[in-house]
Amino acid sequence: MGQDITYLQSRSVNFHNGTVMTEISNPHDRFFKEVLSRPEAARDFVVHYLPDEVTALLDLDSLEVTKDSFVDKDLREHFSDLLYRFDLADGSPGFIYLLFEHKSYSEPLVGLHLLRYMIKIWEQTLKQGETKKLPPILPVVVYHGRSKWKVRLDFAGLFDCPEAFKSYIPDFRYLLCDLTRYSDEEIKGAVILRTGLLLLKHIFSDDLGNRLPNILGLLGDLLEKRSGLEYLETVLKYVASGTYGVTEETLKEAVIEGLKDKGGHIMPTLAEKWIEQGIQEGIQQGVLIGQLQSAREAVIENLDTRFGVVPRSIINTVDEIAEITILKILLKKSIIAESLDQFADIMRKTLD
């Protein structure tokens, strides 16, 4: 096929009337995806945050969006249906995937999650019959939590075993872009990528309200374009949808101060509308997330009452389930299962 494909990954679950929709429920995931779903931002990220020896392999000008040609039904539960394709810089045949995962907390099992996604990509590639050999996949984790990333970057770090077994354990490393380790001056890229990463970096900061005017001010020159206004709407809704220590009034003042020379009288009015929409989305999202967590807890509590201590493997699997309908099924199964092993088997079959 003679090309590279950049695969932008993010969890994709949203709920409406108890059914699963193909969208992102986590506001950080949603914002991350909305930033990097823009081809210019994705190209920017590759240029500034991937190793030089990787970017040297890519013809960056050849980037194009490829939809609906790769992601099957199973993959849609884990990935957005966005692919970025690059030709190889030297024109040689072959391709490479860049797999992006977003995290707002240190996830000890992220290596296992990445491996699962990588296997699905390889399986689908083989099904398409485009190659008899597996293409390389470069996993990239973008992190913006409250403290520095504490998890090892190698998959083998998940194992604790005798030296004799290590040669039989699959291993790979993932690239980490830990925004907590960058100063604001080190956050590079054009305006959309830079503002997006700065906002992710400071979203949990106590002084987010004080930083917002400067972050929003970077968007000033973009507001003459429709795409710039749409991006500002995305930013304001993201901040307004969560409890990040920024009041509605502070956010409005940040817009006025940061964009005081742009938009005249209409900008505060638009901003107020978008902020209110973000607040409403946040309220709805909070209700849905609360329902989801309650359903998870009900399954675990029922198992604990019936069988005693629930294995960590079952708890971790239940915690990852983001579908109300599946959790309702498992809650019923937790009542009739004759043992924890039987429940674990039922859960595996339900999730397959």
Image (cartoon, rainbow, N blue to C red):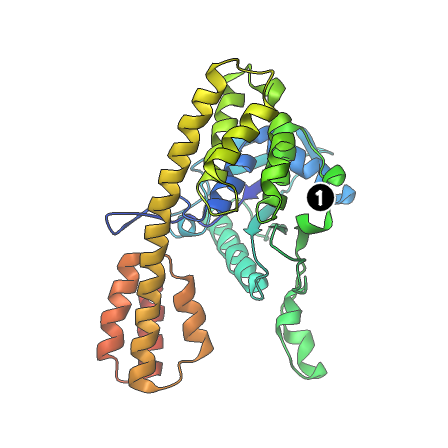
Q: In the image, residue 32 lies at what x, y percent?
A: 54, 42
Q: At 55% from the left edge and 60% from the top edge, which residue is drawn?
A: 115
Instruction: Give left or right: position of 340 versus 312.
Output: left
| Residue 260 sits in quarter | top right
On-image quarter of the C terminus: bottom left
Q: In the image, residue 243 lies at what x, y percent?
A: 47, 47
On-image quarter of the N terminus: top right
186 or 347: nearer the eye? 186
Instruction: Give left or right: position of 73 versus 96.
Output: left
Q: At 30% from the left edge and 83% from the top edge, which residue is drawn?
A: 305
Instruction: Give left or right: position of 299 versus 232.
Output: left
The correct choice, above or below, for 126 with respect to 37 in the image is below
The answer to whether one can see residue 217 in this image is: yes
| Residue 276 sits in quarter | top left
Q: Which residue is mark 1?
A: 50
Q: Amino acid at mark 1?
A: Leu
329 or 244: nearer the eye? 244
The correct choice, above or below, for 84 with respect to 304 in the image is above
The answer to whether one can see residue 86 in this image is: no
Count up the numbered dots.
Answer: 1
| Residue 170 sits in quarter | bottom right
Q: Secondary structure under badge 1?
A: loop
Q: Residues within 10 Å of mark 1 (few under 14, many from 20)?
A: some
The correct choice, above or below, for 59 with respect to 308 in the image is above
Q: At 25% from the left edge and 65% from the top edge, which residue is drawn?
A: 329
Q: At 63% from the left edge and 66% from the top edge, which residue is drawn?
A: 155
The correct choice, above or below, for 108 with respect to 121 in the image is below
260 or 156: nearer the eye? 260
Q: In the image, residue 311 lies at what x, y percent?
A: 43, 80
Q: In the image, residue 288 lies at what x, y percent?
A: 33, 52
